[in-house]
Image (cartoon, grey):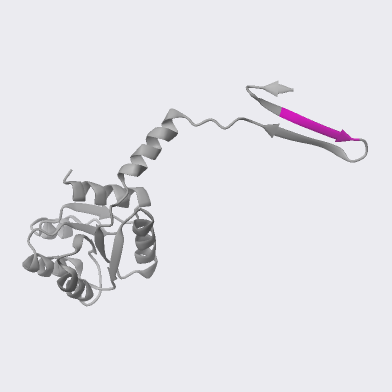
Amino acid sequence: MKSHGGFINVYSEVGKGTTFGVYLPSIKTELQNVEDQHRDLLIGQGELVLVAEDESSIREVSVSTLEAYGYNVITANDGADAVALYIQNKDRIKIVLMDMMMPVMDGEASIREIRKIDTGVKIIAVSGLVEKDRLAKIADTGVLAFLPKPYTAERLLKTIHEVLSGK
């Protein structure tokens, strides 16, 4: 029996039952092509991203996502470590992903220290808490985007792409 270019295979045996096999042709839709092109736009070109995040699970997922999409990544567990790593790699780091709530030195203080080193650094602030007071405090630090937790891989990649391309 044929159906839309595919076919159905039926096998039946008395006392054992019936097996149906449905074979359909593979069809790639325009929507899939658009999604593939959209994902291609999110692929990095080896840019170095500093990920400052104290939660290891979030840090690991962010790193694996960024590396899978063509970015190089270095990580910091707290704000002071982020500042030290920025000093060591300031000529190579293209963007900083900074968690706002970290031990030792919080994101706000870290951003201010990194800005003293490089006023043009591209920074994305990340937080699970969207407090108007905290957002107001970082507004004058030159943060280019805010990424609320939890975020998807696509949202992370899109935000990084937008900040790097100046959109």
Measured as percent of width and height from the top left, residue 100 is found at: 22, 64
Indicate whether 84 appears above or below 53: below
Where is residue 13 drawn, in percent x and y?
89, 36
* Image quadrant occupied by the C terminus: top left
Is 126 left, or right, of 139 in this rendering?
right
State the predominant SS element of the stretch in magenta.
Answer: strand
Q: Residue at the location (67% across, 32% down)?
A: 23
Which quarter of the figure has residue 132? bottom left
Q: Is residue 10 left or right of residue 102?
A: right
In the picture, residue 46 is in which quadrant?
bottom left
- One can see residue 152 in this view: no
- What's the magenta region? 8-13
Q: Is residue 42 above or below residue 67?
A: above
Give me the residue at 22% from left, 77% from top: 104
Query: Quick check: 143 left or right of 13?
Result: left
Q: Is residue 42 visible?
A: yes
Which residue shows up at 16% across the image and 52% down it? Answer: 144
The part of the image, by quadrant, that contains residue 96 is: bottom left
Q: Is residue 136 magenta?
A: no
User: How far across and how far down the image is residue 90, in percent?
Assistant: 15, 67
Q: Nearer the viewer, residue 153 or 68?
A: 68
